[in-house]
Each structure stands twice: as C-alpha cells, then as structure tokens.
Image: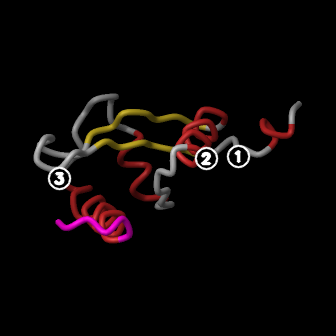
Amino acid sequence: MTEEKEQYNKNSKAVALKFEMGKDEAPKVIAKGQAEIAAMIIKVAKEHGVEIREDANLVEILHALELDEFIPLEAYTAVAEILRFIYQKQGKKL
C-alpha cells in the first residue's frame, strides 16, 4: 500500500460545493466521496488552493445529496457561514 493510500480514513467523507455569487441560485454538490475518494477530493482541493472546512454534521447532510443537487434549506446557515469566512479571507465583499 502506498503512503498516499495509507493517509485516508475508511470512515471519512468529503463533499465539494460550487457557488458563484450572482450566477448560481444556491451552492450545489459537485463532488462527494468516502474513504479514498474523500482523500482525493481533499488533495485536489488543497492543490487548487480551495479552502477546506471540517464539519461532521454538515458533511452527513451534504453527502446524502446527489451530484449537481442544490443544498437543502437546513444546510443554508452553515454553508453561508463557511462562504462568508472564505470570501472575507479572500478579501471579497458579500
């Protein structure tokens, strides 16, 4: 087993969201996976300078969605807080 494959947890999950302010009506799921797929999603995100946030409860909600599905209302507050943090860190105005 390679070192890279050893770095993932079999129970880990990852979800990638896409949202373009002024273009998209809401954030939507563009990638999701468990175990090795989750590790790959995180690796690609890091390589592209994408902010990563850990939230076990939120990932469970988002992981249940289909690809290209908009986030549900119950996730809006948590996702909005994450987006606010990212935009502020990047110096963007909301």
Check the image and report above or below for 11 versus 34: below
Q: Within 10 angstroms of label 3, few (less than 14), some, or many (20 or more) residues? A: few
Which image quadrant for residue 20? top left
Q: Within 10 angstroms of label 2, few (less than 14), some, or many (20 or more) residues? A: some
Question: Which residue is under mark 3?
Answer: 73
Q: Secondary structure at mark 3?
A: helix
Q: Within 10 angstroms of label 1, few (less than 14), some, or many (20 or more) residues? A: few
Residue 25 placement, left or right of 71: left
Which of the pair 52/64 is nearer the observer? 52
Residue 12 image label: 2
Check the image and report above or below for 37 versus 80: above
Asked if labels 1 and 2 touch by Cβ distance under 8 angstroms, the answer is yes
Q: Secondary structure at mark 2?
A: loop
Q: In the rendered structure, which amino acid carries the disc numbered 3? A: Leu
Q: Secondary structure at mark 1?
A: loop
Q: x, y percentage for residue 59? A: 43, 51
Q: Which residues are magenta?
A: 89-94
Residue sitting at x 17%, y 50%: 21
Question: Which residue is under mark 1?
Answer: 9
Q: Earlier in the sequence, mark 2 or mark 3?
A: 2
